[in-house]
Image (spheres, helix red, strand yellow):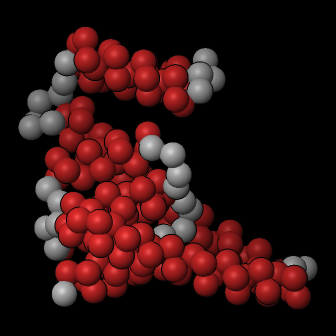
């Protein structure tokens, strides 16, 4: 029964998530933490960290982690397949349509109207992780705020590669937190 629930939830997540992995994190949190309690809030934040540092798409890594936590290896496979199936079908159909109707203005209109929804989903995922990591149990953690600001500056202003920022943040967290 749980495998079927995992498949259906991640099929829905895969069907509704546009804009990449960060856009899916809010949907995964709702399904895995709030609706089904497959994960605790702490496990979800571990899932976010795990999905970001492992190779591959964030959404699929997150689906695999959530499925594994809920039902072991069969759960990981089931959640991952559910998550990827809508994209596979959609890309196949879009490729067929694109080759025939690429110049039509309706395509451009539909794709540009999805952008605000994607931004909202990414912001929701960011706020969930930020609030838990920096604000915590009602009090602002000054060290976490400084680490966040430093990592932001390193990635944006100094154009440091994400892997290097993550590695430095891990070392700083180990030493300071």
* 9 up-or-down from 114: above or below: below
Horizontal and vertical percent for residue 70?
20, 67
Tell me, yes or no, if residue 19 can be seen here. Answer: yes
Please name whichever residue, 137 or 84, is drawn nearer the observer in this view of the structure.
Answer: 84
Horizontal and vertical percent for residue 31?
26, 71
Q: Residue furthest top?
A: 175
Please name whichever residue, 15 or 82, is drawn nearer the observer in this view of the structure.
Answer: 82
Q: Quadrant of the N terminus?
A: bottom left
Residue 13, by quadrant, is bottom left
Q: How many marks?
A: 0
* 119 up-or-down from 143: above or below: below
Q: Quadrant of the C terminus?
A: top left
User: In the picture provided, is 129 more to the left or to the right than 116?
Assistant: left
User: In the picture provided, is 151 more to the left or to the right than 103?
Assistant: left
Tell me, yes or no, if residue 104 can be seen here. Answer: no
Please name whichever residue, 60 or 139, is drawn nearer the observer in this view of the structure.
Answer: 60
Q: Residue at x 25, y 11 (%)?
A: 175
Horizontal and vertical percent for residue 126?
37, 47
Residue 142, by quadrant, is top left
Horizontal and vertical percent for residue 8?
34, 84
User: In the picture provided, is 68 more to the left or to the right than 126?
Assistant: left
Q: Residue furthest front?
A: 73
Q: Residue at x 42, y 69 (%)?
A: 80
* 88 up-or-down from 58: above or below: below
Q: Residue at x 42, y 18 (%)?
A: 168
Q: Residue at x 27, y 86 (%)?
A: 4
* 96 up-or-down from 10: above or below: below
């Amino acid at each position: 029964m749980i495998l079927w629930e995992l498949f259906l939830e991640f099929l829905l997540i895969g069907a509704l998530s546009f804009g990449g992995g960060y856009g899916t994190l809010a949907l995964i949190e709702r399904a895995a933490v709030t609706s089904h309690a497959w994960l605790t809030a702490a496990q979800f934040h571990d899932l976010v960290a795990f999905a970001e540092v492992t190779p591959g798409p964030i959404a699929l890594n997150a689906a695999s982690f959530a499925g594994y936590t809920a039902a072991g290896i069969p759960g990981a496979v089931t959640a991952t397949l559910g998550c990827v199936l809508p994209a596979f079908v959609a890309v196949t159909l879009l490729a067929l349509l694109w080759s025939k109707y690429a110049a039509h203005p309706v395509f451009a209109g539909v794709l540009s109207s999805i952008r605000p929804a994607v931004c909202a989903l990414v912001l929701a995922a960011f706020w969930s992780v930020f609030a838990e990591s920096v604000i915590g149990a009602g009090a602002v953690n000054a060290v976490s705020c400084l680490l966040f600001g430093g990592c932001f500056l390193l990635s944006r202003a100094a154009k440091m590669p994400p892997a290097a920022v993550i590695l430095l943040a891990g070392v700083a967290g180990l030493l300071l937190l």
